[in-house]
Image (spheres, grey):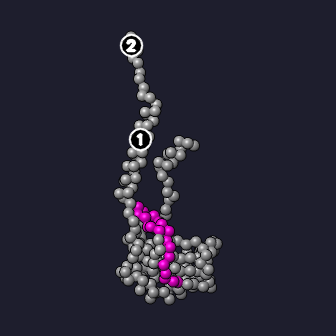
Amino acid sequence: MLQDYPITQQPAKISKLVAFIEFVLVLLAIQSVLLLFSQEVPTSEAAQFRILANSNTAADQQMKLQVQTAIAPLLEQALNQTPTKQINEQLLVLKPQIIERARQQANGLPITFEHSAALIPPKRIGFAIQQQGVYDAYILKIGRGKGDNWWCALFPNVCFPEEATVAETEEEPVTFFIWEWIKSWFS
């Protein structure tokens, strides 16, 4: 015959406190790993490239894609032939050709191509983060230039010569496993 042994349990408050402390420690460990692998994208010397469509209509956005396709070979040629520090001079030499190719695709809309400082929002590129700030930028404006634009998505080699392949892939929406897990507890 088996004897009855008293089963003792820890008070519920202590086990919840231990679970909470373990959870916080895991979050701190994840944060420290992310900080180790995160790095900033050095963009102080690289010129940004921006294309502004006439508007957000599908036709104007399609026209912007056609302009991008038409001028991409000129930009690639400039990047391949000149060092990063001399890209500004090369783009100024190519400015008339860039404007002409853009006009051919713009269906009579005016084209402007200017070199100025522009506010660029923060952007994640792989594990690196480009900080928001005012950067040296080339702005190609189609018509009124009131449409959405892509920061460095069109010409990653101009913005980040060493990061060209990262921007070419489609980005998936970012979700955080721990946050989704916490939300699942309350839903």
Q: Quadrant of the N terminus?
A: top left
Residue 120 magenta-drawn? yes
Residue 113 location (% of width, % of height)? 52, 83
Residue 80 location (% of width, % of height)? 38, 80
Given residues 15 and 69, the one toward you in this image is 15
Above or below, 22 against 123 in this view is above
Residue 6 magenta-drawn? no
Magenta stretch?
Answer: 113-132
Q: Residue at point 49% right, 71% down?
A: 120
Residue 22 location (% of width, % of height)? 40, 41
Q: Is residue 34 left or right of residue 140?
A: left
What amino acid is labelled 2 in the image?
Gln
Image quadrant where residue 60 sits: bottom right
- Element at badge 1? helix
Crowd tier of the residue under label 2, counting other residues whose Cα lies within 10 Å: few below 14, some 14–19, many 20 or above: few
Q: Residue at point 60% right, 74% down?
A: 147
Of the numbered discs 1 and 2, the one sitting upstream in the chain is 2
Q: Quadrant of the C terminus?
A: top right
Above or below, 16 against 92 in this view is above
Q: Is residue 156 visible?
A: yes
Residue 39 location (% of width, % of height)? 38, 63
Q: Residue at point 47% right, 48% down?
A: 178
Residue for badge 1: 21
Residue for badge 2: 3
